[in-house]
Image (cartoon, rainbow, N blue to C red):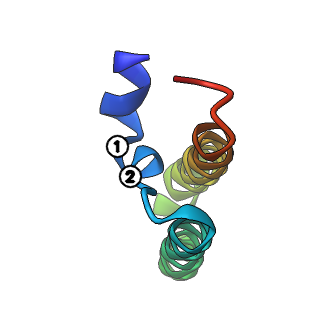
Amino acid sequence: MGILKKIWPYSFVNKNGVAGLVINVIIQLVIGIVLGFVIGLLAGIPIVGILVGLVCGLLDLYITVGIVLSFLDYFKVIK
């Protein structure tokens, strides 16, 4: 559990009930959308496009796991 809190620290900070959970998820989605847009712009560069595509996939995975951990922490499935 300590490793999860070190890798995804923002997923475990919702202490304000449902409002905190919703704000947490919205912030993570907005960060993912903004970074996805920036990565999408960089993907047009021919050589860099392959590396940027891999980073985008990892970023999407990181955001998705962070949102899932936020819900699991809120519902006290993980402690």
Q: Residue at x 56, y 82 (%)?
A: 37
- Label 2, secondary structure: give it: loop
How many numbered discs, if any?
Answer: 2
Quadrant that contains the N terminus:
top left
Q: Residue at x 69, y 41 (%)?
A: 75
Q: CA distance from mark 1 to mark 2?
A: 7 Å
Residue 67 position in % (x across, y down): 63, 52
Instruction: Check residue 13 in the rendering and tell me which mark sits there, or answer none.
Output: 2
Q: Nearer the viewer, residue 4 or 72?
A: 72
Q: Which quadrant of the view contains residue 61?
A: top right
Outermost front residue = 17
- Hey, which quadrant is residue 53 in on the image? bottom right
Mark 1 lies on a secondary structure that is: helix
- Residue at 63% of width from left, 54% of height from top? 60
Residue 56 position, x and y percent, is 58, 56
Neighbor class of circle 1 (other Cα within 10 Å; few <14, some 14-19, many 20+) is few
Q: Amino acid at mark 1?
A: Pro
- As drawn, the label of residue 53 is none
| Residue toward you, 67 or 35 | 67
Q: Position of residue 74 (x, y in %)?
A: 61, 46
Q: Is residue 78 above or below residue 60?
A: above
Do labels 1 and 2 touch, CB within 8 Å? yes
The numbered disc on residue 9 is 1
| Left or right of residue 15, residue 72 in this image | right
Q: Viewed as shown, does residue 38 lie left or right of 36?
A: left
The amino acid sitting under disc 2 is Val
